[in-house]
């Protein structure tokens, strides 16, 4: 395959339809995320059945690391950072929806895309 013609995949559909709605974009990515998470869980279950001793030792090591680390401070910092980023993200989303709405209304009636 040539570099100018990428292989078809989940990302190529997004490039083929530039006028997708944000809701459809989110739904597509959530579906892909659910599929990926289910594959990871299936792989983890298969690994656990093949290597039960390693799995138990890994779980004990992870539990010890979580006990030793200051998890409440780390989690609090992550939540604080997420809340700080929520306002700009909501503002950008609102501006993009407003821009999209004004672009739709600015087009002549004959040239509007079918929704």
Image: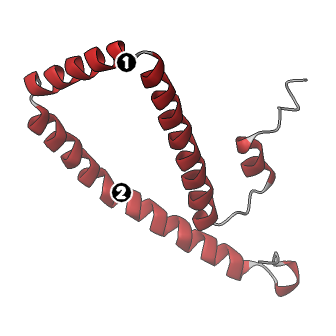
Mark 2 and mark 1 in contact (Cβ < 8 Å)?
Answer: no
Q: Where on the picture, by quarter, is residue 73?
A: top left
Numbered disc 1: secondary structure? helix
Residue at 82 percent across and 38 percent down: it is 8
Q: Where on the picture, by quarter, is residue 55?
A: top left
State the quadrant of the N terminus.
Answer: top right
Of labels 1 and 2, earlier in sequence is 1
Q: Nearer the viewer, residue 57 or 111?
A: 57
Expressed as whole percent of the image width and height from the top left, the position of residue 101 reads 61, 77
Q: Nearer the viewer, residue 20 or 41?
A: 41
Q: For residue 14, which numbered disc appears in the image?
A: none
Q: Which residue has dot 1 on it?
A: 52
Expressed as whole percent of the image width and height from the top left, the position of residue 7 reads 83, 32
Expressed as whole percent of the image width and height from the top left, the position of residue 54 reads 34, 13
- Count residues near mark 2 (Cα–Cα under 10 Å), then give few for <14, some for 14-19, many for 20+: few
Numbered disc 2: secondary structure? helix
Q: Where on the picture, by quarter, is residue 53?
A: top left
Q: Is residue 11 left or right of residue 3?
A: left
**CA gap, disc 1 to disc 2?**
45 Å
Q: Which residue has dot 2 on it?
A: 88
Type of colouring? secondary structure
Q: Is residue 46 left or right of residue 115?
A: left
- Count residues near mark 1 (Cα–Cα under 10 Å), then give few for <14, some for 14-19, many for 20+: few
């Amino acid at each position: 395959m040539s570099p100018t013609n990428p292989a078809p995949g989940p990302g190529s559909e997004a490039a083929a339809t530039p006028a997708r709605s944000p809701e459809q974009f989110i739904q597509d990515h959530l579906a892909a995320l659910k599929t990926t998470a289910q594959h990871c869980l299936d792989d983890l279950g298969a690994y656990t059945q093949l290597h039960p001793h390693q799995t138990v030792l890994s779980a004990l090591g992870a539990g010890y690391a979580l006990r030793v680390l200051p998890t409440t401070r780390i989690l609090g910092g992550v939540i604080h950072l997420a809340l700080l980023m929520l306002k700009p993200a909501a503002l950008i989303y609102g501006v993009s929806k407003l821009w999209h709405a004004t672009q739709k209304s600015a087009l002549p009636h004959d040239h509007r895309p079918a929704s």
